[in-house]
Amino acid sequence: MLLVLTAALVYGTRSNGHPLTEAQRVHRIAASLRCPTCHELSVADSTAPASQAIQAEIANQVRAGRSDSQIRQYFVDRYTTWILLSPPRRGVTLIVWAAPVLAVLAAFAFLVVGFRRWRPSAVEVSEEDRALVERALAGDAEKATEGATRDPSVRPAAAKKAGTRSS
């Protein structure tokens, strides 16, 4: 499953070999920036005037020959890393990227430990108890109860039915 997912991600992010047009670059950069007024939308998806102004600025910088990372850094310098829809994978924001992976690993470890502890534990049986069971299975139930150490709180089945207590 993981291999199929990795192959799909590699294939999907692979370049088709053709350079991007100016409009494609503008859209790709705008899709990675947050709209300053809408907050939940990217600059590419928003129709707010602030987003349109940012798209125009991106187009100007693309025409000026700046790289995508230089253009993104321009907006980070102006708005801080908040403007990025995808937080950088360093510093404190690394927690945002690592937390889901750590949560899945912790859940898996919890399940492994839980299932290992769930196994039924072995009960130690004394030789006296073993002999008692063997005599009872042999049909000698009366002798089996006579030879056993008696606990006053445990009554034989016949005494329970009669309502009397044996000592």
Image (tube, grey):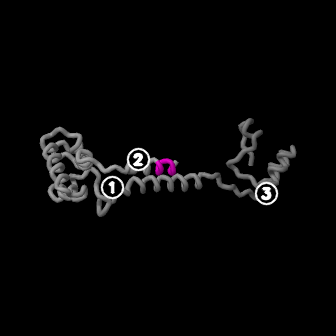
Q: Tell which circle, 3 or 2, labels the residue nearer the N-terminal end.
A: 2
Q: Residue at x 20, y 40 (%)?
A: 46
Q: Which element type, helix, strand or loop, lies under badge 1?
A: helix
Residue named by callout 2: 12
Of 111 and 25, the residue lying toward us: 25
Height in image: 61 above or below 157?
below
The x, y position of residue 48, in whole percent, is 15, 40
Residue named by callout 1: 96
Q: Residues within 10 Å of mark 1 (few under 14, many from 20)?
A: some
Give the Cα distance between marks 2 and 1.
Answer: 24 Å
Q: Residues within 10 Å of mark 2 (few under 14, many from 20)?
A: few
Q: Which element type, helix, strand or loop, lies under badge 2?
A: helix
Q: Which range of residues does the magenta coloring cover?
A: 2-7
Give the Cα distance between marks 3 and 2.
Answer: 71 Å
Question: Is 4 within the magenta?
Answer: yes
Q: Residue at x 67, y 48 (%)?
A: 153
Compared across the picture, whether 45 is left or right of 102 comes to left
Q: Nearer the viewer, mark 2 or mark 1?
A: 2
Q: Nearer the viewer, mark 3 or mark 1?
A: 1
Which residue is the extreme one toward the front? 18
The x, y position of residue 130, in whole percent, is 79, 54
Q: Nearer the viewer, mark 3 or mark 2?
A: 2
